[in-house]
Image: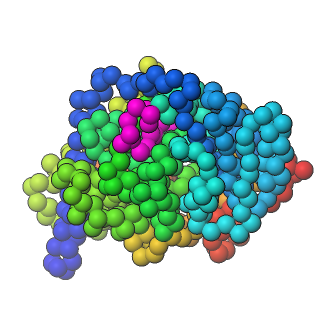
Amino acid sequence: MQIWITLIEYLYTVTLAGMALYAVYISILMVLYLWHRREPLPQPPAVAEEMLPYVTVQLPLRNERYVVQRLLNAVAAFDWPRERLEIQVLDDSDDDTTALVQAEVRRLQEQGVTIYMLHREHPTGHKAGALAEGLRQARGEFIAIFDADFAPPPDFLRRTVPHFVADASLGMVQTRWGHLNADYSMITKAQTLILDAHFTVEHISRNRSGLLINFNGTGGVWRRAAIESAGGWQADTLTEDLDLSLRAQMAGWHALYLPQVVCPAEVPPLAAAFKQQQYRWAKGAAQVLRKLGAAILRSPRLTRRQKVMVLLQLSAYATQSLFLMMIVLSLPMMLYHPHLPGIIPFLGAVASIPPLLYVLGQIELYRDWPRHILAYPGLMLLGVGLSWSCTLALLDGFLHWGGEFVRTPKFRLEGRSGRWQGRRYRLRRDKATRGEIFIGLYALVTLWLAIYLRQWPVVAYSAIYALGEGLMVASVLGQRPLEQVFRPHMAYVNLPTKSDR
């Protein structure tokens, strides 16, 4: 029995120490952000009209019938000389999206836009494969990339490409994501807290203090030479954007973040869609860590500070596993009352720092930030509900290369308008659902015992965990009949519905 109690003590201490370490990493980013936030924003240098370079815009998409026309119209409206702009629609669709793209491309071509579609009936390499195939046929010296749910502003190229002309060592420019449907629901509001913190506090602190930043896969521009010299797009990870951006910076190319250039995009309205998106990002981050970790440590170009911070960045999803361990340990902690070391209160205080990251992100962007931060309880539920799925993703990423690229469905939701119910691209149960059901029940048992023993801190923690896991399960069951919960995994189903006919 004493061995069992000692093991509980050890695991709890190590888990809390891991959470405190991540909190220290977040604290460093927040301090760097506060130190650099008042620095002047980089402004595009003046470039003569005849000196503007040729740009290729790549639009990788798959089954995007609801948003593709909005994207094509937005990109076709770019303020850039038409004789120096081409648009590639990299279509891997297997539904009627292809027909919609063909019709829209013909219409835009008749208006004088240089646009064409590259359709792959048997796509390999997912998004990385589509981008690589398009690059082989691209004529542009610079490559702008947008996912299907984005609506970039007309002056996007004017505010980004001139930076490359002025700096021959600049390999990548990333801009800030905006939100077309931030106020659509509690789920979308919670997600915007994460995105705003990433695109303000994290990106600003990293870029302005000389740390490595990541390309976010869309809403950015690449120098073609940087892509090619870094080894090109590679499909052995599910986060080809993160992989390439780190390889390019390790090869000596610089990156620039422009927070004042905003590209609005759609936020997933479903908790299940957000979970699958996070699964892909967590697995991809683990794969990139596995792929580049040793190279980062050996890199002669990177400073020690850069190496430590980027390795912590790649390991950030491990906090989800730590959250999971905390709820697993809560029940035996109440039953056996182990003697914990005196450092535990200090570690607990440090581990409580990260929520300030989201507050800073809202203060940076919105005058009415207190209203926005009210979505934090929803973010807590989403965060704890992801713990089992992200743990599976990390294990998957460390054990396997590549994998299924589960697309996040979009429905053209803007503001509070639009509906996803009854439309195509309905998500099915993923392989985490059964585990989430079990963990939710475990949290309920812990909650009941904590109430009986009057362990009020554990009551609050267990209630949040039970609600979070319940939210994830209900998000899937809300779309599909209950009898399909335990069917084999499928990313989504592309079925005609009454509203589509």
Residue 430 appears at what percent x and percent y? 59, 67
- Quarter placement of the N terminus: bottom left
Q: Which residue, as the protein is rendered here, is positioned at the far right? A: 501
Q: Residue at x 26, y 41 (%)?
A: 210
Q: How does the figure colour the protein chain or chains?
A: rainbow
Q: Which residue, as the protein is rendered here, is positioned at the far top? A: 367
Q: In this orientation, does residue 17 appear?
A: yes
**163 left or right of 323 in image:** right
Q: In this orientation, does residue 333 appear?
A: no
Q: Number of marks in the image?
A: 0
Q: Which residue is drawn at 66% across and 42% down?
A: 86
Q: Which residue is drawn at 83% across and 43% down?
A: 106
Residue 36 appears at what percent x and percent y? 27, 29
Instruction: Using the image, determine if residue 375 lies above or below residue 8.
Output: above
The magenta span reads 163-178
**407 left or right of 293 in image:** right
Of residues 5 and 314, the one drawn nearer to the viewer in this rendering? 314
Residue 102 appears at what percent x and percent y? 81, 49
**410 left or right of 305 in image:** right
Of residues 249 and 481, the one drawn nearer to the viewer in this rendering? 249
